Amino acid sequence: RGVVHRPDGATPAVGATVKLFVGSTLKATAQVVTDGGFVFTGVPLGTYSATAFDPISDAYGRALNLTLAQNGDLADTGVLVLDDTPPAVVSIDPADGAIGVLRTRPIVITFTDPIASTSGVTLKKAGATQTATKSLSADGRVLTMTGTWADSSELTVEVAATVTDVFGRHPAGPLTSRFTTVDTTAPTVTTVSPVDDAIQISNSSTIVASFSEPLANASVDGLIVVKRSGI
């Protein structure tokens, strides 16, 4: 049993439909009466979930883990305040614009409403989808992506408008968030001028070494050492 209110939190959702499930199997249906209450009787022992829909406010609600362990048990949902807004992202961690993010740091996306699956959420680098393991929390509100991300890279978390909550609703639009991973690859020498084995080079020529990335050294003294052959 329980009570269902419309999104204002006070008005009984008279006429709303409440459905009782075991897993994804529908077991019974009830209507909300004038005081906002509903009740199921003659229900076998087990663990149930209940969903409520009010066509007047076009709003949904649900209750999970309603357990009847022995004869005489009563499972009460309490007051279900229905939700009439589409799912939206509350937060993404790492935050948009974060830099120096560890390559193994989980990406955690929190939603306002429980979503039905991890579909529609991707991680990309320069438009290419990156490999990630995705999982949902027990309440469906938190999606976590784990993996080993490319180093020294700007990565984009994309939440598509195709994301679906457990009531079949979609976000108002897509959302993106970007972060940059820490640089763990040592710089390498890409070119040296004069080139290796060059001959007849003027003793006043400038020696230039190019690296694969900017160097952070405060001084370049000692980074390049010139020696005579055999010395």
Image (cartoon, rainbow, N blue to C red):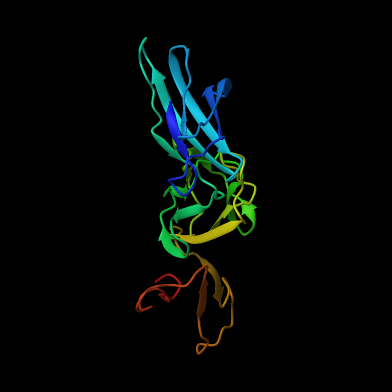
Point out the residue furthest to the top here: 71
Relative to the observer, which residue lies in front, 120 or 70? Answer: 70
Q: Is residue 180 depicted above or below 35 in this figure?
A: below
Instruction: Report x, y in % for residue 44.
Output: 47, 11
At horizontal 50% and vertical 41% (from top left) the residue drawn is 114
Taking the image as drawn, is residue 134 in sight?
Answer: yes
Instruction: Report x, y in % for residue 219.
Output: 35, 79
Does 73 sit left or right of 167 as displayed? left
What is the quadrant of residue 74 in the picture?
A: top left
Q: Is residue 123 depicted above or below 37 in this figure?
A: below
Instruction: Report x, y in % for residue 34.
Output: 49, 34
Does 13 sit left or right of 75 as displayed? right
Query: How many numbered discs, if any?
Result: 0
Q: Is residue 179 depicted above or below 7 in this figure?
A: below
Q: Quadrant of the N terminus?
A: top left
Instruction: Report x, y in % for residue 192.
Output: 54, 73
Q: Quadrant of the C terminus?
A: bottom left
Relative to the observer, which residue lies in front, 140 or 227? Answer: 140
What is the quadrant of residue 201 in the picture?
A: bottom right
At horizontal 35% and vertical 16% (from top left) the residue drawn is 73
At horizontal 38% and vertical 33% (from top left) the residue drawn is 78
Relative to the observer, which residue lies in front, 205 or 142? Answer: 142
Taking the image as drawn, is residue 153 in sight?
Answer: no
Does 230 sit left or right of 196 as displayed? left
At horizontal 47% and vertical 72% (from top left) the residue drawn is 214
Point out the residue furthest to the front here: 34
